[in-house]
Amino acid sequence: MTIAPAALEPILAGHSPAIRQLCQDVVLLLSGMAGLKGSVKLGWRSVNFRHDTVGLVCAVFPHEDRVALYFENGRALEDPEGLLAGDHLKKGRFLRLYPGGDFPEAAIAMLVAEAIALRL
């Protein structure tokens, strides 16, 4: 189920066009992945993606200069490309995405698939 751009407006208001577009691109990518269902969480200012069996898999957070893709149990995921940050976190890790920077679509897909396969 794809989340309409208008549904993102409450969390994207005030962000630059580049951050808005990057956030929409990440949400669109995740929305197209089998088994994931996204919902806008106004209190967290995020879009959370859940799986029916696994629960919360990841969340997209727009920031002033970047978009963060947070993996709920990211510490358990393999990260051969060294994309994930957050070594200080107990269980989660996150990927920082910047406008005009790399958009590692295949790596994101692999991380999501691994999180679901491991039932994380």
Image (cartoon, grey):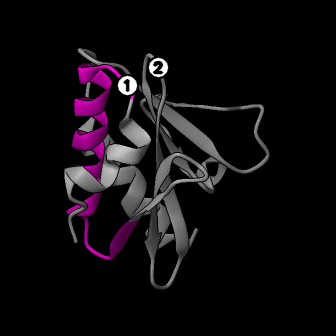
Q: Where is mark 1, residue-wise?
A: 15
Three-letter code for the amino acid on which mark 2 is drawn: Glu
Q: Where residue 10 sits: x, y (%)?
A: 40, 46
Which residue is pictured at 21% across the width and 50% down the height?
A: 5
Left of 1 or right of it: where is 120? right
Three-letter code for the amino acid on which mark 1 is drawn: His
Instruction: Name the residue furthest bottom.
Output: 53
- For the N terminus, the quadrant is bottom left
Let me know if residue 95 appears in the view: yes
**Residue 21 is covered by the magenta coloring:** yes
Q: Where residue 78 sits: x, y (%)?
A: 52, 46
Query: Which residues fall within the magenta stretch?
Result: 14-38
Magenta segment's dominant SS is helix
**In the foreground, 43 or 102:** 43
Graded by Cα atoms within 10 Å as few (under 14), some (14 to 19) or many (20 or more), the crowding at tag 2 reads few
Quarter location, residue 114: bottom left
Q: Where residue 53 sits: x, y (%)?
A: 49, 85
**Total number of numbered discs in the rendering:** 2
**Residue 59 is covered by the magenta coloring:** no
Quarter location, residue 16: top left
**In the foreground, 1 or 89:** 1
Cβ atoms at labels 1 and 2 below 8 Å apart: yes
Graded by Cα atoms within 10 Å as few (under 14), some (14 to 19) or many (20 or more), the crowding at tag 1 reads some
Q: Where residue 14 sits: x, y (%)?
A: 39, 26
Q: What element carries label 2?
A: loop
**In the foreground, 107 or 24:** 24
Q: Where is mark 2, residue-wise?
A: 64
Figure check: 45 above or below 83: below
Dot 1 or dot 2, earlier in sequence = 1
Figure check: 88 above or below 28: above
How far apart in space, not on screen, are marks 1 and 2 (Cα)?
Answer: 6 Å
